[in-house]
Image (spheres, coloured by chain):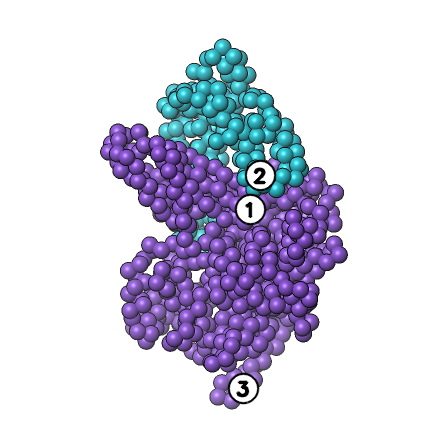
């Protein structure tokens, strides 16, 4: 193994960092201004080269449509996969590309891919490393959320390549954090849970440290859940509370910025005053926010992590790792005190705070990089694949070939035969996901394998899946009669999804797309109202008597507000969304009571 | 496909205990071989040999490579077979409703049914366990039969165990999904 330097990179939703091992110790590198956290933000001032990091953040309010943040959310996904809300809530314009991929449209002429945006961030980190270390940095370990699928990993790898970096390893973020935690504790035997709630993604991994081995036992997550969602909810709350109505792009960007600051302040303070000087037409606004009010907004987001944790804990328990000895918190959002309270309440777990929530992942990436270039002694790191892989079989079912949480690297295969006489080819559709029906899973790619026609059962096709150490898949199909191999190219994004719909959207003018967007959001919001209103009646009938009168009245008023917006002629999508949100919030306690009641009479 | 027993340096036996498989795998990894290919086949061997059903399948592949496994559901599994479909189907209907729900309240309305479904699936798992154990307990017998070239019993057991394992996985999958409700 050569001694050439390898850097470790944490490419985050809101911040990115770069680290390296120096004299046996992992450390995070600072840029020329002494900053270690690079905001994952890129801005393109008209006619000038792009700004990356803090400079781009400043440009966000001035040029929200030319400033791209949280691009990680869109890596390796298709346009068809985006919900109307996601498109609407994104401050810059997202458009579908010719292959159904997501593109960012900066102006009439300029389109950039999520990989290109990420590459600019990675390029800046590469420069920071080269400056700090006074030598070029061309090789890297890059981290991704554990729950990233094949396409999202491939997109990350491609971004690094665009930035001129050779990716030596793609490492899962919670695994990286655990490495940082465990480096000095190699003699210990412990089961460690890493709760990683970042800006845009959530992962929970359970690892076992034993006899110098670091083994991931189970992992679960959601690649669309993070602190960004909180900023948005908070910004919406500000707009509602101040009666601001429709917001311009810059106003929305400014509100989000203030929301994020307020959120961060409330991790340490009980209340915060949010000031919006000269916000609109020279008028200033001010608003006070208490931690209690913020927590009511944050609760539903934090609660979405509970079932994911339960799932990973249950899978770990099945593999003999039922008792969690340590809980490590990673990601900026874990600074919210309510996260810690809830983890204690749900699982009786209190965090080990020895890890820096922002830096642990980058340090782990640096350690892995150090191991690869011989600067740190080897730790036996054993990771898993987060999602099951398989192929579609007869009847549209998913046939799992590599189950989720399998140790990687791994290679597994199966032999398939022709199902009907005279069949001349076999279509192999590669799927990723946990659902039984093929159509409910993520289609990664498809290959048609031709063979000589013969009676049923005569043709034999061997399909072999291999997942490498980066969690990236390769599929090989072999016709056993001819020995001919076909390597299935797994494309970066599924392409055959709603092709027509995408083409139609491209053909339409921007103005029309806006009207269309309002209607799509209205439809989505209407479905939500139609779900909530009968649920309110049912829930009140079942456990309404356990609620204080004023809560019942608040719920009734919120439900009435939804009904009245729903009945209006104008299809005001924004008004319906905010009425829904208010009813959703007003019924949180009612929902909890209902769940509590469901468990009454059932053993522990 | 490589021989998983040989890959881990273990005897071709049905009676391997999980701890010896684990130790053999760890020794292999400690060896410091950095070849990805070798690592992948070692990991695969560990997975196959840790589970009694896939261990039996791997063992039969080596001992009786041309024999076809028995694919019919045995009479003693028929009751379970009849029960399993409806329980899984009703659970799936519930889970589909749950996935569609976008608010905490709409999900909470389904909580009572989810608890009932969970009990139903757990009941199935409790039926599967003893049936599986009854078959894996016969492994010593299969080893003895193999010495005299007799594989009928083990082939039949593999067919039944594959059904049981599949059902067990389906139930576990539902249980995990219900946990997330």
> In the image shown, does B155 or B181 lie closer to the viewer?
B155
Check chain identity for marks 3 and 1: say if they share one. yes
Task: Tell me where residue A480 appears, x and y as whole percent.
Answer: 37, 33
Q: Nearer the viewer, mark 3 or mark 1?
A: 1
Indicate the chain on which mark 2 is placed. B
State the residue at coordinates (51%, 77%): A49
Residue located at (66% from left, 51% from top):
A2
Q: Which residue is mark 1?
A: A469
Q: Is residue A398 visible?
A: no
Separation of marks 3 and 1 at Cα, in angstroms = 53 Å
Q: What chain is the cyan one?
A: B
Instruction: Estimate the x, y position of residue B16 in percent, counting from the top left.
Output: 59, 24
Identify the subunit bearing mark 3.
Answer: A
Pointer 2 residue: B39
- Which type of secondary structure does the marked residue at label 3 adopt? strand
Of the image marks 3 and 1, the number of the one nearer the N terminus: 3
Q: Cβ–Cβ below 8 Å for labels 2 and 1?
A: yes
């Amino acid at each position: 193994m050569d001694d050439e330097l390898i850097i470790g990179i944490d490419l985050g939703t809101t911040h990115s960092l770069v680290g390296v091992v120096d004299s046996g110790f992992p450390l995070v590198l600072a840029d020329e201004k002494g900053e270690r956290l690079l905001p994952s933000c890129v801005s393109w001032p008209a006619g000038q080269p792009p700004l990356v990091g803090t400079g781009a953040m400043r440009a966000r309010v001035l040029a929200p449509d030319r400033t791209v943040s949280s691009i990680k959310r869109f890596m390796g996904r298709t346009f068809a996969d985006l919900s109307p809300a996601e498109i609407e809530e994104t401050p810059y314009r997202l458009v579908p590309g010719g292959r159904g991929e997501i593109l960012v449209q900066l102006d009439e002429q300029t389109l950039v891919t999520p990989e290109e945006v990420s590459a600019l961030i990675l390029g800046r980190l590469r420069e920071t490393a080269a400056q700090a270390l006074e030598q070029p940095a061309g090789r890297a370990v890059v981290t991704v959320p554990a729950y990233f699928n094949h396409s999202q990993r491939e997109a990350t790898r491609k971004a690094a390549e665009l930035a001129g970096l050779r990716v030596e390893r793609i490492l899962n973020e919670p695994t990286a954090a655990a490495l940082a935690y465990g480096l000095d504790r190699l003699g210990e035997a412990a089961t460690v849970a890493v709760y990683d709630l970042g800006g845009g993604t959530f992962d929970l991994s359970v690892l076992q440290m034993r006899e110098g081995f670091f083994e991931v036992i189970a992992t679960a997550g959601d690649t669309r859940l993070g602190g960004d969602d909180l900023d948005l909810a908070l910004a919406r709350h500000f707009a509602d509370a101040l009666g601001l109505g429709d917001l311009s792009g810059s106003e929305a960007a400014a509100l989000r910025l203030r929301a994020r600051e307020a959120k961060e302040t409330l991790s340490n303070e009980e209340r915060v005053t949010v000031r919006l000087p000269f916000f609109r037409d020279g008028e200033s606004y001010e608003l006070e926010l208490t931690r209690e009010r913020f927590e009511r907004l944050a609760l539903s987001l934090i609660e979405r992590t509970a079932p994911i944790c339960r799932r990973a804990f249950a899978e770990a328990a099945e593999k003999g790792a039922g008792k969690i000895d340590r809980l490590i918190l990673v990601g900026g959002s874990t600074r919210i005190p309510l996260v810690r309270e809830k983890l204690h309440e749900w699982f009786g777990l209190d965090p080990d705070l020895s890890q820096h929530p922002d830096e642990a992942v980058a340090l782990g990436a640096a350690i892995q990089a150090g191991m690869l270039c011989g600067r740190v002694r080897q730790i036996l790191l054993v990771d898993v694949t987060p999602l099951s892989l398989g192929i579609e079989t007869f009847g549209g079912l998913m046939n799992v070939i590599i189950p989720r949480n399998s140790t990687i690297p791994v290679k597994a295969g199966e032999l398939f035969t022709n199902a009907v006489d005279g069949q001349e080819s076999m279509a192999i559709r590669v799927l990723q996901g946990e659902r039984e029906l093929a159509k409910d899973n993520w289609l990664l790619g498809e290959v048609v394998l031709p063979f000589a026609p013969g009676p049923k059962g005569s043709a034999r096709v061997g399909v072999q899946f291999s997942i490498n150490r980066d969690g990236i898949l390769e599929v090989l199909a072999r016709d056993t009669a001819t020995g001919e191999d076909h390597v299935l190219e797994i494309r970066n994004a599924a392409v055959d999804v709603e092709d027509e719909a995408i083409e139609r959207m491209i053909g339409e003018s921007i103005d029309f797309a806006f009207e269309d967007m309002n209607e799509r959001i209205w439809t989505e919001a209407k479905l939500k109202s139609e779900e909530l209103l009968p649920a309110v009646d049912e829930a009140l009938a079942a456990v309404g008597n356990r609620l204080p009168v004023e809560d019942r009245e608040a719920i009734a008023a919120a439900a009435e507000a939804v009904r009245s917006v729903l009945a209006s002629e104008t299809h005001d999508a924004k008004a319906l969304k905010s009425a829904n949100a208010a009813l959703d919030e007003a019924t949180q306690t009612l929902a909890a009571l209902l769940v509590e009641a469901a468990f009454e009479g059932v053993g522990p | 496909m490589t021989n998983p027993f040989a890959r881990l340096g273990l005897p071709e036996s049905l009676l391997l205990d999980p701890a010896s498989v684990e130790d053999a795998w760890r020794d292999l990894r400690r060896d410091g071989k950095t070849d990805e290919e070798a690592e992948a086949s070692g990991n695969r061997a560990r997975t196959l040999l840790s589970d009694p059903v896939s261990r039996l399948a791997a063992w039969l592949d080596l001992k009786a490579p041309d024999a076809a496994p028995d694919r019919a559901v045995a009479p003693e599994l028929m009751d379970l077979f009849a029960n399993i479909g409806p329980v899984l189907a009703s659970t799936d209907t519930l889970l589909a409703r749950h996935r569609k729900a976008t608010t905490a309240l709409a999900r909470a309305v389904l909580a009572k049914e989810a608890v009932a479904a969970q009990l139903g699936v757990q009941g199935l798992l409790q039926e599967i366990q003893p049936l599986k154990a009854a078959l894996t307990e016969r492994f010593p017998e299969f080893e003895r039969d193999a010495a005299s070239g007799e594989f009928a019993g083990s082939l039949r057991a593999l067919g039944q165990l594959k059904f049981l394992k599949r059902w067990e996985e389906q139930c576990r999958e539902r249980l995990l999904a219900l946990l997330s409700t």
